[in-house]
Amino acid sequence: MENIMSNKSMTGALNKTEGLGGLMKNLAQGRINTEYTIKDIDTNDEELKNFLFTLGCYEGELITVISVLAENFVINVKDARYSIDKDLAKAIII
Amino acid sequence: MNMEGKMRVALTGNPNSGKTTLFNAITGRIEHVGNWAGVTVEKKEGDIKKNLNKTNVEITAVDLPGAYSMSPFTSEESITSGFVKNENPDVIINIVDATNLSRSLFFTTQLLELDIPVVVALNKSDLTKKKKTAIDVSKLSKSLGCPVVETVSTKGNNNGLEKLISKVVEVKDKAQTAPFDSKGVNMSDKNSVEAYDKKRYDFVKGIVSKVEAREVSSNTQTKQDAADRVLAHKWLGIPIFAVIMWAVFSISQTHLGPLLADTLVGWIDLFYGWVEGLLGEGTSPVLSSILLDGIIGGVGAVVGFLPLIMVLFFLLALLEDCGYMARVAVVMDRFFKRVGLSGKSIIPMVIGTGCAIPGVMATRTIKNERQRRTTAMLTPFMPCGAKLPVIALFAGAFFNDSAWVGTTMYFVGIAIIILGALVVVRITGEKHARSFFIMELPEYKFPSVKRATISMFSRAKAFIIKAGTIILLCNAAVQIMQTFNWQFQVVAEGAENTSILASIASPFAVLLIPLGFGVWQLAAAAITGFIAKENVVGTLAVVYGITNFIDTEELALVSDGANVASIMGLTSVAALAYLMFNLFTPPCFAAIGAMNSEMEDKKWLWGGIAFQFGMGYAVAFITYQVGTLLTTGAFGAGFLPGLIVVAAMIAYVVYLIKKGNEKAERKLALSV
């Protein structure tokens, strides 16, 4: 589901991941067909976070990128396929 | 609880778990279903069929919109829990997608806490075998503490539904113990709820590991994923979508549709002759003209297009059923984002090519408010099924049945939508706003021909009812209003301008002079078009006394096109402008009603209607004036006043955009 985020939180999210210098990466940097464990959902948007939680997409859960289609990532979480955009993939820290 | 002798059952479950398909199967109803998440947006009720319900108790089933959970901190979920609690059902049927236990059972465990008996329908259980997954149903039932029945609601028989209903009757008023309950958890504290819900997921994981054996892990690549990579491909996605939509329209509008329409019109013709013979010479000419030209001629002109619309709905239903729509949303997201919409906006627009009302209602799956409202406002610009007769009439009468007319109308519709979206995102000052896109990708499946047939006939029924009521009344009214003057005398030949209809429509006609069609007949047809767009054709048939647009001899939708064109007295350019005016001004009142309920805001509604009016007027003005300049070397009538009106409208929109931009800059400044 879509939710508006202000620009500030987006740039904030990006700086944080970059600042840790490769120790942490987000799903957009992940490889296809590799199972990752979600470390964090990095967003200020509570509703988005809650929604992802109800899909079973939260820290500690496993996530796999099935394909990358243009700017969309097809992911597998809890036996279901979703298509998410790059901004959202960047918010999923693995 | 409810009165004795009656039972209420609520159908709940995750989106796209097949609730409505199951609802239709147990009640015999024909509610709209589609293979993506979030098709059902309102609750639906129906009585369970007698052959499934072996008791004397009448059971009413309530189909609810899908939800992933009932946790208190998400908006959609609170609606669901409100629904379930307000409906006060005797039993809950929880439809669980058998291919996806680990997510679905989260919601199940929450439902089990409501102190209402639950029966789990393990739906799509035919797919588990395909996926080489085995589920131990009795163990699952024991772990959850409620009956579990395997169902395949898409199958006609041997689908587990009879057993499901008998279980429902069995558990009524029986106590069930929730296997996992949240008593003692502080529901108003976010952190404790979250921690608790994580434990709930762990509990579900425990159950799944006991009852489910997967030979193939769900994250391995499948043929479906390979199909996604083609259908939602960066470059191939759009051409594939274009070809599919082109096929839908060309089959329904130039091949199969008109072929069937010819047969139907032959029957209408026979009927006209039969009634004419029946009336004989003795009937008053006024009465026979109202009956023949007003009712049979006008309604017949519209009903003749029924086959086109039926074929269109059949094909759209196949498209909705196969799982492709979710992929189109993925393909389009990239582009729609640039104009401030969501990829999901494409689904209402595709549905809107059939009818704008379900199209506008489908916007409810779009969570972002501005995107949802913008989509609801722009969806009616897609030419809908009711506008097909109008397009076909003008293509036939003025453009020699050229296919480019219809195709161009769709492209103009798309162009207006893009322009409209760009304008709205700027006016609202959310140019810099970002949004997330997430869409569940349902399994592809072979579309059900049966379902498409049902959808087609239910549409045909609605269309015939509309033709027999609203359109018939409108045509009769138009016929009466043009037959009489205000003194209720029959208007004399040559004095048609004194009729009631002419005097009402004439003031509007003045406004239309800059658009090239400032005559009262055309103004009257455009006005009746707001009641139902088919009325444009019906009214034109009545006011110009053309009884039959569709030719039965040749394979052409409009017979004697040159004749029709000369009766209307329009140049081709003015005819094109008139066609566009009818297509791109606000939709019919019913669609405006749907816009109202989805926008939930009067300012948006009136803004949307004003935008639609302005757009229709401007498009028609530009088409007529530029077209006339190109064809005759001079501007058409009323160029200057029209230019002033259009320029004023554009200036106002520019002013609103400027204001919106300032708002956006302020927001940006605050957030940096």
Image: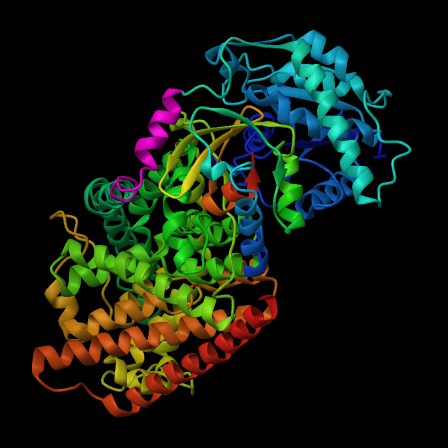
Q: Is residue B127 visible?
A: yes
Residue B656 appears at what percent x and percent y?
A: 47, 79
Query: What main secondary structure does the magenta stretch of the protein show?
Result: helix
Q: Is residue B638 visible?
A: no
- Left or right, B133 with respect to B453, comes to right
Q: Quadrant of the N terminus of chain B?
A: top right
Residue at the limit of the structure toward the right, as seen here: B184
**Above or below, comparing residue B489 to residue B339 in the picture:** below
Residue B307 appears at what percent x and percent y?
A: 30, 44
Q: Is residue B234 magenta?
A: yes
Which of B257/B672 is in front? Answer: B672
Residue at the limit of the structure toward the left, as seen here: B632
| Residue at x 26%, y 92% (from the top left corner) | B640
Which of B622/B461 is in front? Answer: B622
**Above or below, comparing residue B449 to residue B220 in the picture:** below
**Above or below, comparing residue B45 to residue B367 in the picture:** above
Which of B66/B280 is in front? Answer: B66
Residue B555 appears at what percent x and percent y?
A: 13, 47
Which of B93/B666 is in front? Answer: B666
Q: Quadrant of residue B119?
A: top right
Q: Quadrant of residue B101?
A: top right
Q: Which residues are magenta?
A: B222-239
| Residue at x 28%, y 74% (from the top left corner) | B620
- Left or right, B36 with respect to B98, comes to left
Q: How is the image coloured?
A: rainbow
| Residue at x 38%, y 69% (from the top left corner) | B585
- Left or right, B167 with respect to B597, comes to right
Residue B484 appears at what percent x and percent y?
A: 37, 80
Q: Quadrant of the C terminus of chain B?
A: bottom right
Q: Is residue B265 magenta?
A: no
**Above or below, comparing residue B576 to residue B187 in the picture:** below
